Amino acid sequence: MKKLTLTLVLAFIFVACNTAVEPNLEVDIEPTVEISTPQNPERTALQEMLDIANDNWNISSGDFLSSEDVLYDIDFLVQTLEENFPFMSLVERVTGINEPLNSFRDNLTFHAQSENLDSSSFGNLIEGYFYDIFFSSMAHLRVNPLDYHGLWSFDLNPQIDAPPTIIEEGKIALIPVNPSFFNNFATLREMVDLQNFIAEIQGYEHVILDLTHIGGGFIDTAIETFILPNLSEPLYITEFAFITDGVFPTNEHSERLRRVNGNQLIGGSDFLALRNLVSPLVPAAEFAAQHNLTNMNQDDLQNLAYGFIIETLLQPTDLSSLERINWSSRLPLLADNIWLLVSPTNGSAGAIFANIAKEAGLTLVGEQTSHWNSDGRAFFELPRTGHIISMDTFYITDSTGRNIEEFPPEPHYFNRPGMDALQTTLAIIAERAEME
């Protein structure tokens, strides 16, 4: 096996917010200075990767790559995916492409031998075949996903100008979830405006959160704002994960297990790592039998080496001790019914948030979310051309064994014919009111 030059694995993390609020206090804060962009929680972990990426920006897109370098990196990429990417059988089943990794190699090799490729066109070629062959770039399989500043180089969440709205006075309120809450760019003004609105609608029967335009990002701010304040007790979410015996997933599991055993949580004692509580490895078939994962695809299972449990712990916000609300506080919604509007746009962090919200008791309405729900993120560099590849290395199932890339979270209520998610929700609310 060729030496892997770099292994960096990310976990989305969130702050377990311990600030507390009195639910009926009125928020009245006029900020004098806006908070600048919060520090990217992954920035430190990616420093080594960024050093490599910074060097790669110097590669001129007009400089043609040698055929030898391109073919070497194609072989390196295919071998790395073969050993570490756990979804090959799933990709073949879902797309109908026979031996997708061979198809991927053959297509790239054809272009490498018949065209003059510069660095940019080679990266775009890989990205294109990731999208065409691998289930629309499933499991965060991407080329150069980070820009020069350590941020995701593609904007999944375009900004919207849709303020919270009272639909029916004293009864129904709508809160479009601003993309800044998933980009970790929420300003002080946005936070205060939202908390003021939540204070205004305390005691409403229905609060509707619109997530339909959120594609991905980071979920810590959204979890702190919309989930933790509404929990009455700790919430444990259990997932069942499988990996190959490749170096990336086994190293990531070992590191997470070390942190758990040493009681070391990412970021220090005030942080709790999402999907960071893992159990020891068990042979895959034995693990599936132990946990009665009867709906697991057997072809997928044969390609996996080990299984383990991932447990997410969400701690409710303490609402008992705060005398005065400040910009970092999170008010509970205190509604009888909290609705979450979802759509196929919700992938990655959007889909993970939808699943957590469902576990937390919110009612989901809309369409099935997208994929990109996996874990065990790894990054590696193509040694000759310098492109950085990202991929998820954990194959995660629900409690029955169904893979969450293939079967992402479903809403409690699907859109009714001719209606969008909001219209469907309002129709359900109206029908319930008539029955009372």
Image: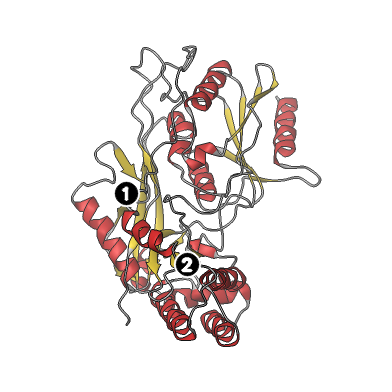
Residue 14 versus residue 328 in the image, above or below: below
Residue 188 x/y as whole percent: 47, 25
- Asked whether, in this view, residue 215 is left or right of residue 70, the answer is right
Instruction: Look at the image and name its color scheme.
Output: secondary structure
- Asked whether, in this view, residue 210 is left or right of residue 396, the answer is right
Q: Which residue is drawn at 54% across and 64% down?
A: 138
* Quadrant of the rendering where the C terminus is positioned: top right
Amino acid under disc 2? Thr
Disc 2 crowd rating (10 Å Cα; few below 14, some 14-19, many 20+) is: few
The residue where tag 1 is placed is 44
Residue 247 x/y as whole percent: 31, 71
**Residue farthest to the right, as pictured:** 418
Residue 394 versus residue 160 in the image, above or below: below
The residue where tag 2 is placed is 294
Q: Which residue is drawn at 58% across and 75% down?
A: 93
Residue 167 x/y as whole percent: 70, 24
* Quadrant of the rendering where the N terminus is positioned: bottom left
**Residue farthest to the left, as pictured:** 262
- Asked whether, in this view, residue 223 is left or right of residue 50, the answer is right
Q: Using the rendered image of the protein, determine whether residue 241 is visible from the camera's viewpoint.
A: yes
Amino acid under disc 1? Thr
Q: Using the rendered image of the protein, determine whether residue 361 is visible from the camera's viewpoint.
A: no
Disc 1 crowd rating (10 Å Cα; few below 14, some 14-19, many 20+) is: few
Mark 2 or mark 1, which is nearer the start of the sequence?
1
